[in-house]
Each structure stands twice: as structure tokens, then as C-alpha cells.
Image (cartoon, rainbow, N blue to C red):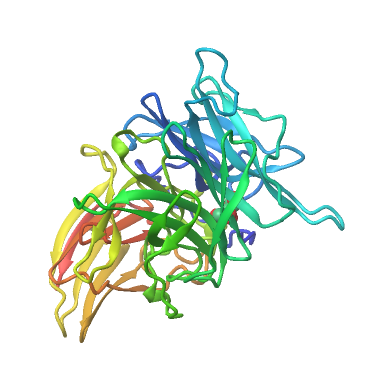
Amino acid sequence: MNMTPPTTTAVTPLRPSAHFTSHTSWLNDPNGLVYHQGVYHLFFQTNPFGSTWGNISWGHATSTDLVSWTEQAVAIPATDEEMAFSGSAVVDTRNTAGFANDGETALVAIYTSARPPVGEMPGLQAQSLAFSTDDGATWTRYAGNPVLDIGSSEFRDPKVFWHGGDDGNWVMVVVDAVARKVLFYTSNNLIDWTFASDFGPAHATSGVWECPDLFPLRVGATGETRWVLIVSMNPGARAGGSGTQYFVGDFDGTTFVAERLTASDDLEEYDWLDHGRDYYAAVSFDNAPANRRLMIGWASNWDYANETPTSPWRSAMSLVREMRLVRCADGRHRLGQVPVIGEGHAGMTISEHTIAVEPGSRSTIVLDSDGATDEQVLVHFDRDGDSASLTVERGSSGIVDFHPRFAAPNRVPIGAHIASPIDVRIVVDATVIEIFLADGTQTVTEQVFPSVALSRARTQQ
Ligand code: FRU
């Protein structure tokens, strides 16, 4: 977390429409994504008293269509004793924790109690519960908190889900952040937890590991299932700063085994959920209908998150993305991500392109304001021998001088599984650009801060 004060006073007048922002405050990771009785709940790390990181609490927003969000009252406020760091929420249908009275169903949030260091005493991070028996409107901290304390100051971001049928149990994935490990615990009641196994360090390890997730997905139409382990890492990710990697493998209820682990230290060899600079801490909804696996990421980067030129809000979420698992021509399983856009949502520009990527000729998609300003974003496609790449240039996109690394281009090698011509879909929503290549098997998310919306997308040879 970079607490440097902003160096610029200019701010963009724009605010995204379908990418959730808090009305007046700071926002980082999505938390507690859960579907319950027709409503999607999005909790988020927020500072109720400001637009930089601090006083960390769980904000709350709701939606019935995943595109229009309504901000609600803060759900779990910071107290004098603790901040409420990232975590998840579940519907305790079987009332395993005993929080619901007759006729009620409890929603249970599992969050990290983060206590700052005091004098000689180190800080502490431990896992705690809060529950709601009024469908998410109000939340009560569990009196027996914390429920999982291993005496660590780097133990956070629990993601909990039910594994198995009626005789199943809860599973928690949580990080030992500095050890670069995901830890797995099991429980029958959300209160008593037993250590099961760990995973890591593996692949990208230069930063701390944060915000894990684990879920099963069918492989295309094959009927086979694989498990996907999501691990965010900051700093040192592929595009610099914060980024999210994933591992495909198997999970038997206690242990995760990755099917492809490479010893290479080349960051490009790993599987990244997104290749842009602004997609972090992505996690999925619990209990989503029709078995859909829906994720939201935080569309920012700890490199400059506290300095982005917006006011009084700061930072947006990504669009909701539906995850698929695809067996690619090279035999590897990759996530395919489809944005949930809704029907003609006002304020977003959505364009589709078919880009031939040939040796010696550069194709460029220009995103601009149709003549209203000179501000633009360029997305170049190049081929050098066998390797194709995409480069996002946002150096002339509007306000860029608030951080030295913001204006630099982001060059992204295009996966070898993607052949020319490439289907490209671009969603622009005020300050967030999401690029989907080849059925979303590669995505690139980048923030911009123009003075007028980049409402036009055209191809230039
Ligand atoms: C990730 C993160 C989490 C932590 C939260 C604090 O962005 O650092 O590990 O719980 O933010 O706001």
C-alpha cells in the first residue's frame, strides 16, 4: 500500500457506469461476493472517511443484474481494535454456525481482523466472522472472534465455500502472505477450523500472495472438471505492481495439486488472470445461480492506487466476468472470461474487431473521443517471427502525470494458443478499459483518466 499523497490536483470528471465505484470514498478489493434470494451482494474494502487507504471497513453494494449497483450502508466498520480486511461471505443454508433463528437464514462473512502493531507488539491478522439474519441489511460481529488465529501478522483474505453435499464441510483458502503459501482449512460450523494442507510457493513469488480463491469448472462440454486456484500477488506481477495468477488442477477436499507447474522464472510462462496493469484481488461469487462462476476484480494497482486522479471517489471494480475453462489447441487448460454487459448499458462503448496480426505490419485500435479532444489510447498488434504481441499505450490518454510508471506502455505477449486473425472485444467505461482476446482466453484491463469519454474505437493499419 503506497501512502504517498497525490501529486496532482487535476481530476477526471468521468465516473464509470457499470464498473462499481463508491459514491464518495476509497475502494479496494471486492469482498464477500455472494448471491442470496435474487440479489447479488458486493462488499468491498473501503475507507468510510476518505479517498485514500485507511480505516478499512467492508462497504456494501447490491445488484439484481450484475451491471447496475446500488451502494448500501457500510456493513462491517473498522473499530478502535481492528480493521476489517478482505474475505468472503456464504449463505449458511444448513445453519451450521447457529446464527439463524427459526425461519431465518444467516449470511456469514469471513473476514480478516487486522490489528496494527502497538509499540513492541507486532500486528496480528486472524480470521473472524460477522453475520446477517436480515438478508444482508445489517451485520453483527461474532462474539467469539477471531475464529482462526495462528499468531501471524501476515495471515489474511479467507475465501470460504461448502465442499460436498449434505455430509460435506466448509473449506477455507487463505494466505500466509509472506511465505507465498495458500493454506487450506476445513470446518463443520465456520467457527472451529482444522488445518488441511498448503500450496506454494509456486510460479510468481516476488511479491506477497493475497486474496486466494478456489473453485471447480467444467472443461468446455467434456464433462470433465478441474479446479482453479486464484492467487493475487503484489508487487512484481507480469505487467508491474499488482497482478493475479491462477493454477489449474485438482482438489480432493483437502489438497490442491496443480497440473502444470513450470520451473521457469519467466513471468510470461505463468497463467495470469489478466495481463493489464489494473486487475487485482479478483474473487468469485458464492452461491451464484445456474452454477455460474462469476468474478469481480479491483481495477487498480497498488503502484498508484492512492494517487489516481478522481474525486471524491477513488478506484473502480472490473465488470463482472463469467469464467469458463477451455482446453486449448496446445493441450493447456485456460480460463475464458466473458464480461457481463447487460442490454445496451448506457455510458459504455463496446466494440468488436477482427485483427490480422502479420509480420511487418502493425494494426492499431484507436480509442478516442471522436474529435472532442486529442486524448487517445492506442492498442497495437504486432508480430515478430512466431510471437505476436499487443501493446497498450495510455501516455496520451488524459491525466497521466500522477505517477511515474502510469504513462509507460504495457507490452503483452499474445498467447501461442491464439491464432491470427484475432477476435478482439473492447469495453470502455469512462476510466476503465477491458480488452478480451479470443473468447476471453486472454484479457487486458487498464485504467485511464481522460477529460471526455473515449467513445470511439476504430482500426488503423
Ligand atoms: C489486497 C490487500 C489484502 C488485504 C486488503 C487490505 O489488495 O492487501 O491482502 O486484506 O488489501 O485492504
| Spot occupied by residue 172 in the image (x, y as percentages of width and height) | 54, 46
Q: Work out whether 243 lies above or below 144.
A: below
Report whether 219 appears left or right of 397: left
Instruction: Work out whether residue 418 or residue 63 is closer to the camera in this orientation and state it.
Output: 418
Report whether 377 appears left or right of 26: left
Q: Could you tell me if residue 302 is visible in this image? A: yes
Q: Could you tell me if residue 370 is visible in this image? A: no
* Furthest residue toward top: 102
| Spot occupied by residue 278 in the image (x, y as percentages of width and height) | 43, 59
* Furthest residue toward right: 120
Instruction: Work out whether residue 128 or residue 431 is closer to the camera in this orientation and state it.
Output: 128
Residue depicted at x 35% and y 34% = 68
Q: Work out whether 169 lies above or below 176.
A: above
| Spot occupied by residue 451 in the image (x, y as percentages of width and height) | 38, 54
Q: Quadrant of the C terminus?
A: bottom left
Q: Work out whether 106 lies above or below 380.
A: above
Q: What is the tally of numbered marks visible in this picture?
A: 0
Residue depicted at x 47% and y 71% = 203
Report whether 120 appears left or right of 79: right
Residue depicted at x 56% and y 56% = 197
Q: Quadrant of the N terminus?
A: bottom right
Tell me which corner region of the image, top left, top right, bottom left or bottom right, holds residue 412.
bottom left
* Furthest residue toward front: 167
Report whether 390 appears left or right of 261: left
| Spot occupied by residue 447 in the image (x, y as percentages of width and height) | 40, 58
